[in-house]
C-alpha cells in the first residue's frame, strides 16, 4: 500500500474565526493548488457561505514574497465571507524581503528556458533565441541577448535592459512591450540599453545612461582601498 500524504492545508476553527495551517515543507505552488481546491469544492457545513469569518494564515517556518501574498489574498477572494486578518511565520516577519543591490548569475539561457529573478540582475552569459529572462529590477547581460527580456515585471518603469549584444526577439519593461526592428545593425558592437521613454521603449548606447537615468549615476568619489 502506498504512503498516504497528509494534507498540505489544515483548517481549524476557533472563537475568533478560522486558522489555515500551510505546510512549509511543500512547494508553494502545491499548497496553492490544494487551497484552491478546498475553497472551491469543500463546502462542509456550508462554512464558505456563512457569515463573515476572520482568517489567520499560519505559514510555519515559510516566508513569502509580496507577490505570493497577493496570490493568496486573491485566492481567498473566491469566498467573500472569509476575511484575511494576517499572516504568521515562525521565522519572524512573514515577508521575504528581496536582497538589496545587484546579484550576478552565470550561465546560458537556452531555448525554452525561463530565468526569473527578484531585484537587479547581472547575467554573465548569453540568452539564446527562445530563452526568456525576467526580473523585477533592471537586467544587465554581459553577453548576447537574442531571446526575450522582461525587466520591471512588477511595474517598475525606471528599470532598464542592457546587453553587450542587444539582438532580442522582444523587450518588455513593466507592461510596455517593444518588438525590435527587422534588421539590427550587426556592425554595432557597443553595449546598448533599453528604457521607457514616454509610452514606448527606446534604445541608446550605454554611455548615455547617466544622462537618461541620472538617478543611477555614481556621484561620490571612491576611496576605499583593496
Image: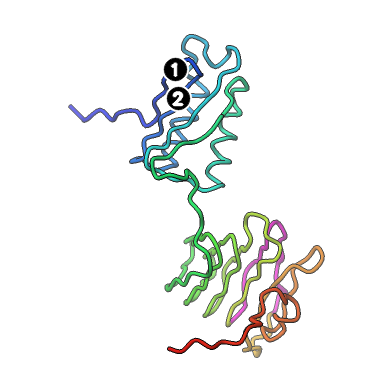
Q: Position of residue 182 (x, y in %)?
A: 71, 74
Question: What residue range appears in magenta?
Answer: 165-183
Q: Earlier in the sequence, mark 1 or mark 2?
A: 1
Say above or below: 218 vs 110: below
Q: Bin the neighbour count of mark 1 within 10 Å (Cα to Cα): few under 14, some 14-19, many 20 and up.
A: few
**Numbered disc 2: secondary structure:** strand
Q: Of 102 and 115, which appears nearest the observer?
A: 102
Residue tagged 1: 13
**Colour logic:** rainbow
Q: Say whether residue 189 is magenta.
A: no
Identity of the residue drawn at 56% across and 87% down: 222
Quarter of the image holding residue 27? top left
Query: Can you say whether 192 is above or below 134 in the image?
Result: below
The percent coordinates of residue 6 (x first, y second) are 30, 28
**Position of 147 relative to 79 (above/below):** below
Q: Which residue reaches farthest left?
A: 1
Quarter of the figure that contains the C terminus = bottom left
Which residue lies at the image location 58% right of the left edge and 14% below the top edge? 49
Q: Which residue is mark 2?
A: 19
Q: Horizontal and vertical percent for residue 128?
A: 51, 71
Q: Residue at x 54, y 69 (%)?
A: 129
Distance in Å between CA atoms under marks 1 and 2: 6 Å
Asked whether, in this view, residue 167 is left or right of residue 121, the answer is right
Q: Quadrant of residue 145?
A: bottom right
Q: Residues within 10 Å of mark 2 (few under 14, many from 20)?
A: some
Depth check: give the residue in front, 36 or 2. 36
Q: Position of residue 224 (x, y in %)?
A: 49, 86
- Quadrant that contains the N terminus: top left
Pointer 1 and pointer 2: residues touching (CB < 8 Å)?
yes
Amino acid at each position: 500500500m502506498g504512503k498516504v500524504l497528509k494534507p498540505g492545508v489544515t483548517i481549524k476553527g476557533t472563537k475568533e474565526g478560522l486558522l489555515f495551517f500551510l505546510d512549509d515543507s511543500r512547494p508553494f505552488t502545491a499548497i496553492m493548488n490544494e487551497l484552491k481546491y478546498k475553497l472551491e469544492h469543500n463546502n462542509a457545513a456550508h462554512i464558505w457561505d456563512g457569515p463573515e469569518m476572520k482568517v489567520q494564515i499560519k505559514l510555519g517556518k515559510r516566508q513569502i514574497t509580496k507577490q505570493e501574498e497577493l496570490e493568496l489574498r486573491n485566492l481567498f477572494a473566491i469566498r467573500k465571507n472569509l476575511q484575511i486578518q494576517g499572516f504568521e511565520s515562525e521565522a519572524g516577519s512573514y515577508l521575504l524581503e528581496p536582497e538589496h543591490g545587484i546579484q550576478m548569475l552565470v550561465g546560458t539561457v537556452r531555448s525554452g528556458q525561463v530565468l526569473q529573478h527578484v531585484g537587479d540582475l547581472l547575467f554573465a552569459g548569453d540568452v539564446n533565441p527562445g530563452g526568456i529572462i525576467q526580473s523585477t529590477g533592471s537586467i544587465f547581460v554581459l553577453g548576447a541577448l537574442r531571446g526575450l527580456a522582461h525587466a520591471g515585471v512588477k511595474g517598475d518603469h525606471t528599470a532598464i535592459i542592457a546587453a553587450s549584444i542587444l539582438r532580442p526577439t522582444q523587450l518588455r519593461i513593466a507592461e510596455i512591450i517593444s518588438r525590435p526592428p527587422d534588421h539590427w545593425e550587426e556592425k554595432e558592437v557597443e553595449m546598448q540599453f533599453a528604457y521607457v521613454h514616454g509610452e514606448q521603449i527606446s534604445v541608446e548606447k550605454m554611455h548615455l545612461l547617466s544622462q537618461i537615468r541620472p538617478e543611477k549615476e555614481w556621484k561620490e568619489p571612491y576611496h576605499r582601498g583593496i
